Image: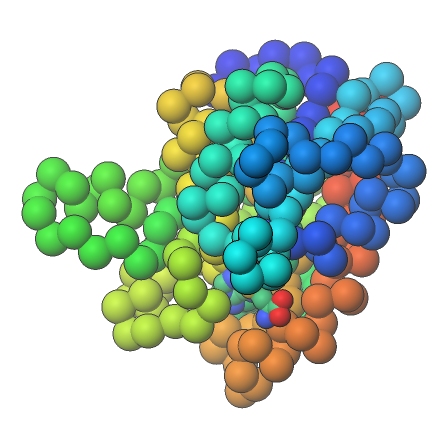
Amino acid sequence: MPDTPIRHAVLLFAMQDEALPLIRRLELDDKGHLAPPMPMRWFDGRVADLRVDVVVLGSDRRFGVDCIGTQPAAIAAQLVFDKLKPDLLINAGTAGGFIQRGGSIGKVYLTGGPFYFHDRRIPLAPFEPYAEGGWTLSNNAAAWVDTLGLEQGVVSSGNSLDMNADDAERIERFAAHAKDMEAAAIAWVADQHQQPMIAVKAITDLVDGEHPTHEEFERNLHTASDALSEAVERLLRLLAA
Ligand code: SAH
């Protein structure tokens, strides 16, 4: 992707609880819905000379929970490119990690890719690479990782919090460090627009650990979201400098 100067960054979060620490830290203004009737919420503000917007997927009209997963994430990304036109799109959120690849609770990965899908099974030759993706959408991520003392990683996305044997086989083949439910969907949209995108993911649960994912997720969501907002703020200050 072209290295354009970054004057405007948009952060896309799936869940409100992931985003709130940063919204408070940066004292962003609540701008309401980004594009009614869609549920995405919009907040804006500045970090020094950098314009910063936060978009959160919002809460589901029918079920009243956060709109996690790929289709709200893709629609949010499209709305962001269409309406906000950032120089850099950052998907910030939590993810499952892997002990066997150095993962631990609260660890933060910053990556420009590759972003894969692990739950799209289309065994028709030309569609297999399409199904798995593997987009890389930033050349700058490695330098930011070094400056901020974070780690680069491979992110793999799917629409389930758990992981079946087929998902596990792909995640192993991709050597993924972070398992989430949005990044690859956002990456596909960024690739259509030929715009840079990175992900910053804090680990809430260890997929290959001994505790059930959903229990670990709930226990660690706030700690991980604090670590996430701290890392994201440091990144924004670096971009603003
Ligand atoms: N149980 C939670 C819902 C969490 S869903 C609740 O009660 O609110 C998981 C969200 O966090 C998704 O947006 C996803 O991107 C991320 N996530 C964290 N850990 C994950 C994992 N192990 N697998 C997939 N997504 C994960």
Q: Quadrant of the C terminus?
A: top right
The residue shown at (22%, 42%) is 129
Residue 155 image point, x, y percent: 47, 51
Q: Nearer the viewer, residue 8 or 148?
A: 8
Q: Is residue 227 above or below residue 88?
A: below
Residue 33 image point, x, y percent: 68, 35
State which quadrant residue 31 falls in. Answer: top right
How does the figure colour the protein chain or chains? Answer: rainbow
Q: Is residue 166 above or below residue 90?
A: below
In this view, which residue lies farthest toward the left?
124
In this view, which residue lies farthest toward the bottom?
210
Residue 110 image point, x, y percent: 62, 44
- Ligand 1 is in which quadrant of the figure? bottom right
Lateral position of residue 95 relative to residue 221, left or right: left
Lateral position of residue 65 relative to residue 136, left or right: right
Q: Is residue 109 in view from this perspective? A: no
